[in-house]
Structures are given as structure tokens and as C-alpha cells.
Image (cartoon, helix red, strand yellow):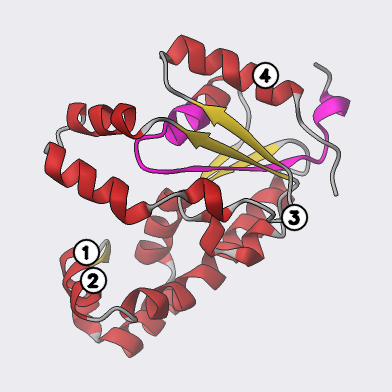
């Protein structure tokens, strides 16, 4: 596969918890391809972006911050009590994340990847993409993977049910979506990534 074949392709990698989207990102990194982890990027912004920290403190109080990021327990309890808190938090954070993604793609004008679990919640970022890879697996497979990570089966099941059917959210979204059904081994997943690389479509 030539560089020209893959030129100017910005690909989003998403999927439900336990689907294997992070494993797809790692496969691509091992090949020397640029991959931005949106979750890690947000944590860096929480720690290092003074403007974002100032906005969060103004919106939620200084107790929402820690020296190296945000107080996760504070936000978990707040979101549990106040259903609108998540939307308020995202409305503050996502513009900063969108700017970071733009900078990442500008620094990697050829083939580049964004790994993001909640990609469907950030339309401004989706607009920057040429294609989305939707990583999925049967619920029982995801449940077992989460259990192997140390979660109780009850907690794992609750998290899977909370996320719902992400695949349904991408139906008719107006952007090419390639589904990667990751129900097998890592070697099998790598073969599926090879197939997905070959299926890259022309930019819209």
C-alpha cells in the first residue's frame, strides 16, 4: 500500500467499552502511524490548559480540580445527582478537544487516526474525519474482556448497558463507516485492521 493511497485520510476509531478500539489504536501505532487518544488528550488538557481549568472552576467550583487534573470523584457524584452536569462539562471541554484534534491533523496531514469512545457526541470533530472505524463485539465477549480487566460482572454489565448501541447512532450519519467485528484474538483483529486499511474510501 503506497503513501499516496492513504494520503489525506483522517480516520476516527470508536466503539463501545470492551470492543477493542484501543487495541486497534495500538496496532496502528506499532506500524508507525499517528494515533491521537482523545481520552488521554482530555486528561492532558485538564492538567495543563490554564484556560480550561479556569472555566471549569468558574462553572463547578475550585473543588472540581486537582493539581494534576480534575477531581473524578467530584464529577462522578455530581453527574449522578444532576443529569445535566455531563452536558455542561462536555460543552466546556469539547471545544478545547476539537482544537487539539485540529492541531493533531494539521501536524499529520497524511494518514492519521483519532481514537475516541464518545466520538458521536462531538459533531465538530466528526466533520474533520473522512471515515469512521466502528469497532464492535458481542456483548458476552465484551463482558468477559471487562471482567478480565478486573471489573465485576455486574459492573461490567452496567457499563455496557449504559453505553447502549453505539452502532445505531452511526446509521445514516453521512460519513463512511467501516465496521470491525472484533470477536476473536488479537492476531485476528490485526487481520481485520489490514482489511480496513485496504477499504479506505476517498475523502468526501
The answer to if 202 sits in the magenta stretch is no
- Label 4 vs label 3: CA separation? 22 Å
Q: Nearer the viewer, residue 183 or 193?
A: 183
Residues tagged 1 and 2 counted as in contact (Cβ below 8 A):
yes
Residue that numbered label 1 is attached to: 72
Residue that numbered label 4 is attached to: 195
Q: Secondary structure at mark 3?
A: loop
Q: Earlier in the sequence, mark 3 or mark 1?
A: 1
- Label 1 vs label 2: CA separation? 5 Å
Q: Residues within 10 Å of mark 2 (few under 14, many from 20)?
A: some
Q: Nearer the viewer, residue 7 or 195?
A: 195
Residue depth check, mark 3 versus mark 2: number of the one nearer the observer: 3
Please identify the quadrant where the N terminus is shown: top right
Q: Does residue 57 appear to the left or right of 98 in the view shown?
A: left
Residue depth check, mark 1 versus mark 4: number of the one nearer the observer: 4
Residues tagged 3 and 1 counted as in contact (Cβ below 8 A):
no
- Label 4 vs label 2: CA separation? 40 Å
The x and y percentages for residue 16 are 41, 43
Which quadrant of the structure image shows residue 154? top left
Residues tagged 3 and 2 counted as in contact (Cβ below 8 A):
no
Residue at 35 percent across and 73 percent down: it is 86
Q: Residues within 10 Å of mark 4 (few under 14, many from 20)?
A: few
Residues tagged 4 and 3 counted as in contact (Cβ below 8 A):
no
- Label 3 vs label 1: CA separation? 34 Å
Q: Which residues are magenta?
A: 3-26
Q: Residues within 10 Å of mark 3 (few under 14, many from 20)?
A: few
Residue that numbered label 2 is attached to: 75
Per the rendering, the mark at residue 80 is none
Per the rendering, the mark at residue 174 is 3
Residue at 63 percent across and 29 percent down: it is 33
Q: Secondary structure at mark 1?
A: helix
Amino acid at each position: 500500500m503506497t503513501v499516496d493511497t492513504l494520503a489525506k485520510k483522517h480516520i476516527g476509531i470508536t466503539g463501545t467499552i470492551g470492543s477493542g478500539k484501543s487495541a486497534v489504536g495500538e496496532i496502528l501505532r506499532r506500524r508507525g502511524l499517528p494515533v491521537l487518544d482523545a481520552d488521554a488528550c482530555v486528561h492532558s488538557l485538564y492538567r495543563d490548559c490554564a484556560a480550561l481549568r479556569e472555566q471549569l472552576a468558574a462553572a463547578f467550583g475550585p473543588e472540581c480540580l486537582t493539581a494534576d487534573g480534575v477531581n473524578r470523584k467530584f464529577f462522578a457524584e455530581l453527574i449522578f445527582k444532576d443529569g445535566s452536569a455531563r452536558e455542561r462539562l462536555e460543552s466546556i471541554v469539547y471545544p478545547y478537544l476539537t482544537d487539539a484534534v485540529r492541531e493533531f491533523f494539521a501536524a499529520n496531514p497524511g494518514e492519521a487516526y483519532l481514537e475516541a469512545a464518545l466520538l458521536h457526541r462531538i459533531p465538530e470533530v466528526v466533520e474533520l474525519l473522512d471515515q469512521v472505524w466502528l469497532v464492535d463485539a458481542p456483548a458476552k465477549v465484551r463482558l468477559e474482556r471487562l471482567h478480565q480487566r478486573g471489573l465485576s460482572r455486574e459492573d461490567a454489565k452496567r457499563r455496557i448497558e449504559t453505553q447502549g448501541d453505539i452502532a445505531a447512532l452511526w446509521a445514516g450519519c453521512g460519513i463512511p463507516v467501516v465496521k470491525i467485528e472484533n470477536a476473536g484474538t488479537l492476531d485476528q483483529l490485526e487481520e481485520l485492521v489490514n482489511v480496513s486499511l485496504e477499504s479506505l474510501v476517498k475523502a468526501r
